[in-house]
Image (spheres, helix red, strand yellow):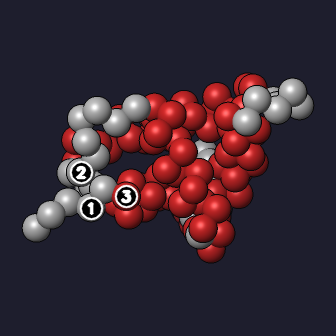
Amino acid sequence: MKKCIYIALITAFFSTNARAYFYDGNHLQKLMAEYQKAIRKDTTTDYSDAWAFRAYVIGVHDTVGHLELYCSPSNLREQQTASIVARFMEKNPAYWSKPGSDIVIAAMKESFPCSE
């Protein structure tokens, strides 16, 4: 009996979709669209989504910034960081299927590569 339960648990574990992130680029793109509307002061903006985009981008930046994956300047501001990621996403829709954190990192690497 224990063997059957063990096999069932192992099968269930390996058959699930291993997704270790909350936002992919498709979800982030929807939030980004609202962020861009907010920047333009569009009266139809969903500000909760707009600020969710900004908060997500800043959260990823602050979390991985010390890893030296990119070399952003010390005077980089929140709006500038979010705008860099938004522009990167507009230019690279192929990234939309990737985890949101990978997109933020790729955008920052492109804008602020570290010199060797």
User: Upstream in the sequence, badge 1 or badge 2?
Assistant: 2
- Report if the CB atoms under discs 1 and 2 are less than 8 Å apart: yes
Rendered image: mark on residue 111? 3
The disc placed on residue 71 is 2
Q: Earlier in the sequence, mark 3 or mark 2?
A: 2
Q: Quadrant of residue 60?
A: top left
| Residue under label 1 | 113
Graded by Cα atoms within 10 Å as few (under 14), some (14 to 19) or many (20 or more), the crowding at tag 1 reads: some
Q: Is residue 98 above or below residue 37?
A: below
Q: How many marks?
A: 3
Q: Mark 3 touching mark 2, by CB under 8 A? A: no
The residue at the point 73 percent across, 25 percent down is 48
Which residue reaches farthest front?
A: 40
Nearer to the camera, 64 or 90: 90
Distance between the Cα atoms at labels 1 and 2?
A: 6 Å
| Amino acid type, label 1 | Pro
Task: Residue at 54%, 60% (x, y): give it.
Answer: 88
Q: Quadrant of the C terminus?
A: bottom left
- Outermost residue toward the bottom? 94
Q: Quadrant of residue 9?
A: bottom right
Any part of residue 68 in sight:
yes
The reply to whether discs 3 and 1 touch (Cβ–Cβ < 8 Å) is: yes
Instruction: Report the disc number at residue 92.
Output: none
| Amino acid on which the number 3 mark rests in the picture | Ser
- Asked whether, in this view, residue 4 is left or right of residue 77, the answer is right
